Image (spheres, rainbow, N blue to C red):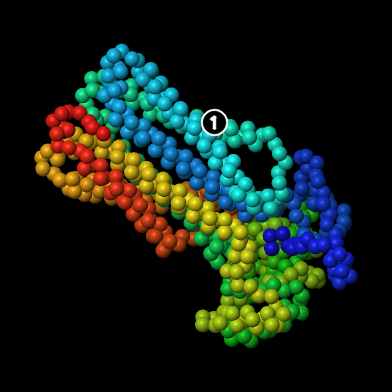
Amino acid sequence: MMCSSKRFLVHPQTLERLQDAGVQETLIEFMLADGASPSQFRRTYEDAGLPASGPFIDRSLIRMMNVLSDSTVIFLLFLVSLAVLAISLLCIRYILFLQLEQDRQQTGMMKALGISRKAVRQIYLVHYALLTVPGILAGLLAALILQRPLLKQLRELYGTAPDSSAVPLACLLAASVIALIVLISVRLSLHSLDRQSPLDALRNPQTFGRSGTRFMSAAVCAGCTFLVLVPLFLSHTLSSPGFVTSMGIGDAQLRLDLQSAPTADSLSERLQKDDRVQRWTLLKTYGESARLKDGSSLSLPVETGDLEAFPVTCDKGSLPRQQNELALSVLAARELDLEPGDILRLEGQSEPFVITGLYSDITNGGKTAKALHLKTYQAPVWTVGYVTLKEGADSQSWMESMSGAGIPVTSIRDYVRQTYAQTLHQLDLASQLAAFTGLFILCVVMFLAIRLSIQQNRPTLSLKKALGFTTGQLKREWFVRQISWCLGGTAAGLLLAMGPGQWLCRLVLEQLGATGFDFDIPCPATLAVLVLICAAALTATWCSLSVIRSVTPCECLRGKETS
């Protein structure tokens, strides 16, 4: 339905046999010069009266189909990469804080011996630079190894791209940018060394506040929750039956595709008498031409009938309610430069039409229109029926009876699955990858955060043990404090997924003509993810608290830290 064309590649001998049994179709292809407008060329071609009975497929339609399939997954992977990078920078920052806590006396001693602060910073900066370079090289090597299985489907669908020297350069540039971001983050974190005098470093073991570690715990929970929920919400929304209203299709139970008017007339009588049918409508599509302001025309499929029976989603305005009204798809309105309230003339129609609204549509190139009725003597290009059965009616037997009468019928759920099968499969894989990545990062960072917090507060823990507190009591105290931060971070991640996450997905789909996009949130799955995130964070917290056993009561008397 997105391109109105299905093709098969056959052997030349098979083609010779098929030519005698069918009508031959001719494909006419053009490569336009740089800067030429495909829309203007199309209007010029049609005005010249050249053959134009088939669908018009341009690069924008092919781009839209690519975005619906592979580019949607690439967008999610890019979003996951940004979230992982942000969380990684947070990890590096607090790992560095932990290292500075452990090396506090050494850095204080170096300053007391006269080593400048700049030299001390350079020691740590060189150390982390030497760790960053092998990490970047390992990432490049992993990308080279994984590129063949990851790009297998792209090569099968679109062919092999020509070799280009720009690809390795782009990879090296991206790796260099990531290394630069990491080193800048390390450099900014090392400013804390400038605020420490040699005496403070030698005598005061606490310079970093406890709230910093707790904030990191909440921030990581929020980031990982966002990382897991956005792919889950997008996958569930695209696979839900209600999303068809953003595809230009009615939210019905069943869909019937007809080609001839006599079949549509007999079907109308049959549906009228069928006791199992609760609501139905037949929509006829005519191939019309819109007259533009410059005098040229544009092919525009216009769907007519009872549009309110199974309405589509309107981004602006509403569907037509009178004979001289017309609703345009978003992509068609963009090309025609029209808004609700403007006037549009169709060739062959005596009266102009008033644009009442703009609706979402990604079928048939995304450039369609809807009206109640057209005064025309031409036969409809196709007829589509939408049916919803009464509660308790057996839809499978009803579909079999229609198929037996030669009427193609498909459930809307299967229609969505067939249209987006590959996309939904890839989205599911991306969701699983995001969930695994998010949980892994969450456990590692929470473990490091608690270790950092314990390292910061060893003297306080030692003093409490000297006063009679047991290790179990201290662990329970820290664990209870951590619960509220984990719950708060998880709730913040949910709000981020429902706010900025939904906005980013909406921004991508709006470029395809699917406006008014909202997440269809699966409550059971969302609740399960939130519980899983909290459980993983608290489990990592409890495991990391075992280091409290190594804190001895005499440490507070010695006035020094032990690792």
Q: Amino acid at mark 1?
A: Ser
331 vs 35, left or right, is left
Local packing at callout 1 (Cα closer than 10 Å; few below 14, some 14-19, many 20+) is: some
Give the labeled residue for mark 1.
176
The image position of residue 195, as x and y in percent, is 30, 23
Give above or below for 494 relative to 5. above
Of all residues, the one furthest to the top in this rendering is 114
Image quadrant containing the N terminus: bottom right
Residue appearing at x 17%, y 37% in the figure? 552
Left/right placement of residue 471 relative to residue 541 reads: left
Q: Is residue 356 visible?
A: no
| Residue 492: x %, y % from top left | 38, 49
In the image, taking residue 308 as reference, residue 204 lies left or right, namely left
- Tell me which residue sits at (85%, 68%) in the image: 18
Looking at the image, residue 125 lies above or below residue 300: above
Residue at 39%, 25% (x, y): give it. 124
